[in-house]
Image (cartoon, helix red, strand yellow):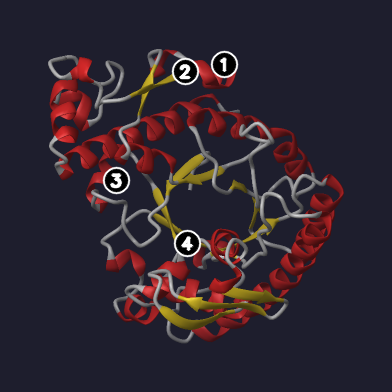
Amino acid sequence: MRFPVYFPDATRAVIRSLDSQDLQKVGIEGIILNPYHLASQPGINVIKKLQGIKEYMSWKGFAITDSGGWQLLSLVYKNPKFGKINDQGVVFYKDSLGKNKKYVFTPEKSIQNQLDIGADIIICLDDCPGKNASKKEIITSVNRTILWAKRCKTEYLKQLQKRTETRPLYDPYDSRKRPLLLAVVQGGSNKKLRARCAKALAEIGFDAYGWGGWTANAKGGLNIDIGKFIVSQLPKDKPKFALGVGYPWDIIEGVKAGYHIFDCVIPTREARHKRLYVWEKDPNKINPLKTNSRKLFRYFYPDKGKYASDKKPVDKYCDCLLCQDYSRAYLHHLFKIKDSLSWRLATIHNLRVYAKLIEILRKNVK
């Protein structure tokens, strides 16, 4: 895997409106999936029986599985009726489709599910506290994240040894022949807690580390100060994953801060909601690391009436299917009649912008 790299969220084993070939054509090299959602539909056992997620969705690139830690925040911490959390693990009372179903989610189960899915990078289950969590709650989160990371590492090694019998390519001692294991650093905006968590995880030893929890500051922008601090507390020779980051300009700032892997739902979700990213300058003639990242892009809203008869491409600097073959007027029309092709073309465009950004960042990162 070359760095930096961006992974769009294929939460339920799909980028909505696109197939695997679409992703490869725009330059997407990997995707991130969610075991909690996949456990609800189609079921982990189905994916396992069909020889893993890549075979299941005909995907030839990299695959990362999120542990499910974010669901603690987005579901259980927001609504205690959805489940409960303790040091043993998480008990969900509903599946991701909203159906009543008791589902026990422990660090051990999380590792087993991710290995069954067949990802290239798997993530330790972590306790992700809410944005407004108290210091006491953040301390509990850090303690639990460290505890769960130890259990994840133990289960990971146990499962690798066990699975070498059925998967000869697994080699616990060769990182090229096993899925990599990533641990998530929690601690909120408290640097002492972030440092304690990072140090404890580094002592356990993992292949990579992630910036967990809320990455935004009080004003809604990227909390790059905390991001840089976390990097300073981790082994220099290990990849760093900025989980849930983010906007194109945030990826640029993240690379400057020392992060290598990024994921987010932003470009695909916003494409479906009629917001596209457009280059302000020719990307082939800029160094994004030496330019004001906020001034490299602008938004394009295809549903505005002024585009109804506009024959120009959405972005004159973009080489995607939408910009090369279709006009602003046509995309405007597709959104107006609510045809599914509008989603596909808009999503292809946004992902191509992200892929192009990664291409030029690689050229300029030393």
Spatial CA span between label 3 and label 1: 28 Å
The answer to whether marks 1 and 2 mark residues whose Cβ atoms lie closer than 8 Å is yes
**What crowding class fits label 2: few (fewer than 14 Cα within 10 Å), some (14-19), or many (20 or more)?**
some
Disc on the earlier residue, 1 or 4: 4
Secondary structure type for disc 4 = loop
| Residue under pointer 2 | 296
| Residue under pointer 3 | 23
Secondary structure type for disc 2 = loop
Q: Position of residue 353 (x, y in %)?
A: 37, 30
Disc on the earlier residue, 4 or 2: 4
Q: Position of residue 94 (x, y in %)?
A: 47, 76
Spatial CA span between label 4 and label 2: 32 Å
**What crowding class fits label 1: few (fewer than 14 Cα within 10 Å), some (14-19), or many (20 or more)?**
few
Disc on the earlier residue, 2 or 3: 3
User: What residue sits 65% from the left and 77% below the top?
Assistant: 89
Spatial CA span between label 1 and label 4: 34 Å
Tell me: 324 left or right of 115: left
Disc on the earlier residue, 3 or 1: 3
Front tag of 1 and 4: 1
Secondary structure type for disc 3 = helix
| Residue under pointer 1 | 292
Secondary structure type for disc 1 = loop
Disc on the earlier residue, 3 or 4: 3
- Measured along the vertical axis of the image, is residue 201 above or below residue 357? below
The answer to whether marks 1 and 4 mark residues whose Cβ atoms lie closer than 8 Å is no
Spatial CA span between label 3 and label 4: 18 Å
Front tag of 2 and 3: 2
Q: Amino acid at mark 1?
A: Asn
The answer to whether marks 3 and 1 mark residues whose Cβ atoms lie closer than 8 Å is no
**What crowding class fits label 3: few (fewer than 14 Cα within 10 Å), some (14-19), or many (20 or more)?**
many
The answer to whether marks 3 and 4 mark residues whose Cβ atoms lie closer than 8 Å is no
